Amino acid sequence: MYSFRSGWFNRIFLLIVLTCASLIIASRFGLTFIPPLVSTTLYGWALLLGAFALMLGIANTVRFHLVRVQRGQREWHLSLLLLIVFALVLGAGISSPGGTTGLLSEWIFDAVVAPGQATLYALTGIFLLSAAYHFLRIDRPGGLWILAGALLMLLVQTPFLYRILPDALVDLVDWLLSWPVMAAMRGVLLGGALAVLFISLRLFVNGAK
Amino acid sequence: MSPFSSGLPGVLQDAGLVLGLFMSLTIGSYLIRDNFLARLGQYVLIGAGLGYLAVLVWRNVLWPRLFAPLIADPLSWQSPTGSDLSNLWLPILLGVLMWGGGLELLRLPPDRFAGRVLLRLLAAAPAAILGGVVLGVAVSGAVQGTLWPLLAAALQLPQAEAVAAAPGPADSGRAAWLVRLLTLLITGGVLIHLQNGPIAGEKENRTSPSRASSPQEADAGAGGRPNLYRMLILTLLRVWEGIGRRALWLAAGIIFARLVASRFSLALARLDYLLFELPRSDLWQLLWALLRGGGS
Amino acid sequence: METGSPLAAFDCPHCGYSNPAASQFCVHCGTNLARRQPPPAPAGESADEPNDLAAAQETAPPRPGVASEGRKPSAGSTDPGAPRTRPHGSSEAEEATGETGKEKPEPDAVRPGPSLGGLGGLLEPADPLAFIASDAGALDPTRDPSTALSGELTTDEEERRQLRQLFSEDLPLPVGARPATTSDTEETARNGNGLQRQFWLEMVLLLGMVGALLWGGQLPPGGAGPHPLPGLEQVHRQIDTLPPNSLVLVNWAYDPATAGEMDLVAKPLIEHLLQRQAKLIVFSQLPGGPATARRVIASAEESLQRPSRTQITANLVIEAGYLPGGAASLPLLGVAPARALPVDPGWVELRERFSIAALGETGPALSLVIAARAEDVRRWLEQVQPLNGGPVVAATSAVAGPAVRPYLHSGQLAGLVSGWDGGAVYVRRLDRARGAAEQGRSLRLASGQNWGVAILILALLLGNLAGLNQRRYR
C-alpha cells in the first residue's frame, strides 16, 4: 500500500539530503575531488527551487482562502477581499512590462504594502511598554541584572539623558557593550553554532546507520 | 508617494495617499482592540503582499533566469558543455515536479491511481535537494563563519586596536589581559549555562528531600566518603556558570534597551508620517482649505 | 496514578503557553509537544511497551535517535523530553510521579529523548538546549531521573525560558501566565493578545510621542547629539578610504516593516558611498527589499543634490533585485556573483560596465549588510565572507547591534553602525549641509525618543511598585 512512511522512501529521501549536504560541505572545506562547479550548481538550484517553493506557498494560501469563501466559513468575506486584492495586484504587475518596477506596482507598494507593514510593526513599539511594565521587575529571577543593564543603556542612548551623564558612566556602558556583553553574546552564538553542528552530525550518523 | 509612482495621473496619486492613510488607520486601530477594521486592513495587506510577491518571483526570478533563456533557445540541452542542461533544464524539471507534487498534495490522498502516487513520491526529490543544500550550508557556515572565528577570537589576545578603541579599564597592557580573562570566563560560563542550565546545587536539594541532601552526599562513593576532587570541580563549574548567567542577564537588559530604541523609532516614524508628511500633500491642503472655507 | 485529566492544559516547555492537552504543537511558539510523552501507564501495562513500540516502529518513519539507542531500558539517563503536565502546580501528584519514575525506570525508547523525529526533525523548531542537555544529563550521575520525570519546572528552568524569550526579541509573557485561566487574561485575549496590556500606559506613551513630535522640532538643538557606540568610526574610515569606482556589494536586508528605523541608518551610509563614487550592486532576500532600496537610494541622491537620478543610478548603482532561497542561495554571491544576477539580455551591458565577472575572482572592495535582524548579518558572515574574503561593514537596527558585536571583535566585521542614534551620528560626519526640514525631523525624532524613554522609565517604576505591593498582599 502507498505510504510516505515506508522505509525505502525515507531512505532515498535521506540519501539525497545527505549527498547534497556532503557535496556542499566537501566543496566548502576545499576537498579537491569535488569540482567547485558542483556546489555552484547546487546553489543555483536552491535559488530557483526557492522561487518555485514560494509560488507553491502562494498557491496554497490562495487555495485556503478560496475554500473559506466556498464553504462560507468565518470571515469568508474578508477572505474574498484578500483574493480580490491579490488578483488586482497580480494583474497590475504581470500586465506591466516592468513587473514590480512598473508604475502600478510601485503605486501599490507605496499605497498599501509600505504603510500596512510599517504600521503593523510600529504597534510593537507601543505594546512594548506593557511588556516592560509586567516583565522588568526587580523581584524576578535576574531582575536586578536585567534592570541594571536596561537602565544603563537607556541612559546612554537617550539624547537628553546622555547630555547630563558623567563621562565615566558613558565609558562604562561602552566598555560593557564591548567586552562582557560581547562575550556573553559570543557564548550564545557559539552555543547556537555547536547546536547546529551536533544536530547535523546526529542526522549524518543516524542516516549512515 | 515616492518618485517611482509619480508618472501616474494625479487622481491615482491622491487615491494612493488616501489608501495609505486608510491602511495605517485600520491596522493602527488594533491598538484600541482587535476589531473588524484592523482585520480588514490585515487581509488587504496580506492579499497585496502575496500578489506583489508572486509578480516579483515571476518577473524577477523565474522568467529572466529560467523561462526566458529556455524559450530563447529550446534546444540548449544539446549543447556540448551541458551547462544549460544542469543550469536550466534540470532545475525546471525539479521545479515542475515540486509544483506538480505540491498541487497534488493539496488534493485528497489517492487510493489507487498510480500516476498520482508516483507524482507525490517524485515531488520529494526537489524538497530533498533543497533540504540537503540548506543542511550543507548551515553546517559549513556555522563552522567557517561562527564557530572557528569566534573560538579563535575568544582564545586569542585582544587586538591592540580594539582594546585601544574601547575606553575604560582596558587601556593598559595588564588590564587587557584581565579583560581577556573576563571575556573568556563569560563566554565559557554562558556555554556551560546553555548546556547544563544552573549546575545542580542547593535548589535541587531543597526541592527533593528524598535524595542526597548535599553535593557531598551525592558525590559520596560506596563507602560514604565525599569525593573532594569532584566536589571542587562541581563548585568551580557552579561559580563559572553563575558568572555566565549573570552576564547573560546583563546582556538581556542591554538588548531590551536597544529593542526599546528600535521599536520606538518605528512608532515615531509612523506618527511623524501621519502628523507631518501627510499634511504636506496637495490633497490634504485642498481638504484643509475646503474645511476652513466651510467653517467660515 | 493520575497526572491530570485528558482535558487538562499542557504548558509548553519552551514558552510556557498553556495549550490544550491534545495539542501536538504549541499554539504560541510552534514547539513540538508530541515529544512529551503521555502520562505513564499503569504498572501492569509497562511490560508490554517494548512490543508496542516495535509495532509502532513498523509504521513510523525511521527515528535516528530511537533506532540507535535500541530498545534496551536504561535506568540512569535523564530526559528533558519527559512530561511536564503540571509545571506550575504543586507537588503531591508530582511527587507520586517522581516516585514511580524512580521505581520503574522506563525504557529510553518509550521516553523518546530529544532525538530528531524522523525527517520532520528538519522542519521542527528544535530546541538546541534539549539536544545538548540530553547527552549531558545521561552522563551526569548526580542528576536524578525522578526530577526529570516529576514534571515540575524549576525556578532555574523558568529563568532560562525568560532569557530565551528575551533573546528571541519577542514580547515576553509574564512568568507562569496562563492566559486561559484568569479573568484578566480573558479580557486581554478579547483584545487580541495575551500580554496583559496596560491600555492607559500605552495611551500615555502615544500622547507623549505625539506631543514630542509636535513641539520637539521647535526646540533649539543643543549638546553633541546621540552617543556614538563603538564600531561607528571604523565604518566611516572603511568607506572614506574607498577609491573611486570600487565595487561594493550591498545586502539590503530590511523592508518597509522596519524602514522607520532602518532608513535612518541606511541613508547616510548610501550617501557616503555615492560621495565616494562607489559602484553599488544592491540585492535583497526580502520581497520588499528592492523597492525599499530604490527609495532610499533616490532619497540619498536627492540629499546630495545630484543632477539626474538616471545618470547616477546607471553609473553607480545596479539593482540586482530579489534573491530567493535564503541561506542556501547566498553562497552564490561569494563564489559566482555573476550567476546570482539575472541572465536577462538587458543585464549584459550592465555586467560588462560593472565588471561583474571580475567580482568572482577579486571579490568586492567592500560588502555592506544593512539588516534589521542580527540573523542576516550572521548569514552573510557565514555564507559569503568565507568565500570572497572581502571586508564587511554592517548597518543594523538598534536591537541587532549587541548580537553582532562578537563578529566586530573577531575582526569579521570591519565596522558597525546600529540604530537611529548611530545613523544620526553618522550623518553629522558627512561632508554636506543639512536642510532645515531634515534637521527639524531629526530633532523631532530625538525629542520623541526622550519622551518615550521617560515614560518607559516611569512604567518600570510603577510596575515594580505594583509588584512589591502585590507581594505584600500575599
Image: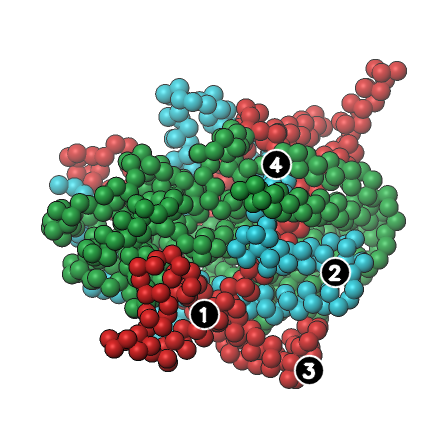
Chain colours: A cyan, B red, C green
Mark 2 residue type: His
Q: Chain of mark 1?
A: B
Residue identifier under label 4: C198
Measured as percent of width and height from the top left, residue C151 is found at 33, 50
From where the camera sits, is residue B59 visible? no
Chain bearing mark 4: C
Element type where label 3 sits in the image: loop
Q: Give the class, few, some or many, for how many residues have Cα within 10 Å of label 3's Cα (few <14, many ≥20).
A: few
Label 1 sits on residue: B238
Residue that appears at 30% across and 74% down: B220
User: Residue C354: x and y, percent?
Assistant: 60, 61
Among the two numbered marks 2 and 4 on one chain, the one whose residue lies closer to the N terminus: 4
Give how far across and how far down residue B296 sits, in percent: 88, 15
Viewer-side label of 2, 4: 4
Q: Secondary structure at mark 2?
A: loop
Cα–Cα gap, marks 2 and 4: 31 Å
